[in-house]
Image (cartoon, rainbow, N blue to C red):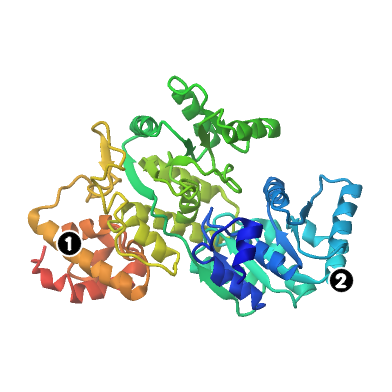
Amino acid sequence: MNDSLLKNRFGLEGFRVGQQEIINSVLAGRDVLAVFPTGGGKSLCYQYPAVLGQQLVVVISPLIALMNDQVETLTRMGINSAYLHSGQTQAERREVFRRIQGGGAFILYLSPERIQQEALQAWLKTRSIALFAVDEAHCVSQWGHDFRAEYSQLRILKRIRPDVPVLALTASATPLVLADIAEQLMLKDPARHVHGFYRPNLYYQVEACANDETKLQLLRVALERFSEGRVIVYCGTRKMTEELAFQLRDRYPTVSYYHAGLAADKRKETQEAFARKRSRILIATNAFGMGVDYSDIRLVVHFQMPANIDSLYQEMGRAGRDGLNSTCLMIFAQRDKGLQSYFIQRSQAPARIQNARWRALENLLEYAEGGECRHAEILTYYQDSQRISRCGHCDVCAPNSERRIQIPVSGFQTLLRKVMRKSTPSASITLTPEQQRDFEALRLWRRAKALELDVPAFVVLSDRSLRHLVQVRPRRAPQFQHVYGFGAVKIERFAQELLNGPLASLEWTER
């Protein structure tokens, strides 16, 4: 590694966690799967090899605006780069090819659609190319949270140039999604690097509310707490973004909203207002996010829960990119699950994809209801190379922290103490001292089982399931079907072990 190159050309004093390992794999000519959180410095992993080797690197990027931002940044750094897209004139495209012909380091950005053009493929076959980099690579996988049909054809890269290594980059992907990315892109024995999911400056908090009115009250408290810096509030529907912006304008007249249903010029105007801080608070659907990179986002709120943990983590990751303390708050009511269920039911995806989406939604609920360190659970969920047992800055580890947004009124239910669904027998029932003792014993079993399987504790069982378990007190495997969270799979995996282990030692009497 060339430290002077890193400092003189990129203005950096050193590599961030994981960057050097990824770059080493690229320089060794290997295909690479790299999971690197939003704002973690993914782009350096292909920019550095281009400059070091004075070669052409081709980057597949999903958004013209994102390509433009990257090229502007590289141009300021004196690094040759350009993009090709449908909005350019023929003369502009010819100029790009002329510049590449001059040799040396060059980073060329292409859309996934353009790479399918036969003329461009023929040109790529004639060039000396150091690397193909696929950004937002989770879009390749139908198991991912943001599948895009145009990405599914990117295996053409290996067909036209099997000699060129591929670097697949994403900000969030589970082991299942990574395996699918490798298969779809036809990667050969890829080096796998998962780094940087631990964000110690972020405080994670989850609160369940009875309805949208109490959610709005908590949101107002959060906005008052963060009177400086930018704020993003994510909603699940276009209608909610507009309604929420209207509700907040009495106190915040410049609040704006963003969703895919707005006209292109209106979306651009909204983005620019937020970028220039004319609007400090933005209410948005998940249409706002990819390529967003502002250093001073102090608060990210999910006013309605997203579809899965991947979306939650990626959107939370837009907070605190300058390293300063920031808060990520998810607040939701029971109807939010109904909204996501509706989206799954109305989709035209194959049954296997719909089933995966149901499982992802249940994982998110179990994460919310979990009683273990939220940062630790995220690290294990993504199989990060770094693991912790306790962070000290989430609502589980530090419920009394000054960083926590305090609940202002009665009617709220914290997920550490109560459960969401009133239809569940375990809801609103306070555990007796004996039941609390049994609950803690089951938590110890769950923690050990999670370590054994190397999965988050919530994947084993949520706190809600454990509480219900001490109330139902099953003595035989079939009785577990009456316990919240126990479907056929979990009954098969855990029921007999629980009966023979922790449940047997609790001296329960037959019901």
Give residue 435's quadrant in the image.
Answer: bottom left
Using the image, tell me which numbered label, if any, was put on residue 440: 1
Q: Quadrant of the C terminus?
A: bottom left
What amino acid type is highlighted by mark number 1? Glu
479, above or below 234, in the image = below
189, above or below 389, in the image = below
**Residue 417 image point, x, y percent:** 22, 48
What amino acid type is highlighted by mark number 2? Thr
User: Is residue 478 visible from the viewing direction of this image?
Assistant: no
**Residue 361 image point, x, y percent:** 44, 54
**Residue 60 image point, x, y percent:** 71, 59
In the rendered structure, which disc, 2 or 1, sits on the residue that comes first in sequence? 2
- Please name whichever residue, 126 or 374, is drawn nearer the observer in this view of the structure: 126
Query: Which residue is the site of mark 2?
Result: 126
Q: Residue furthest top?
A: 250
The residue drawn where x is 37% and y is 67% is 387
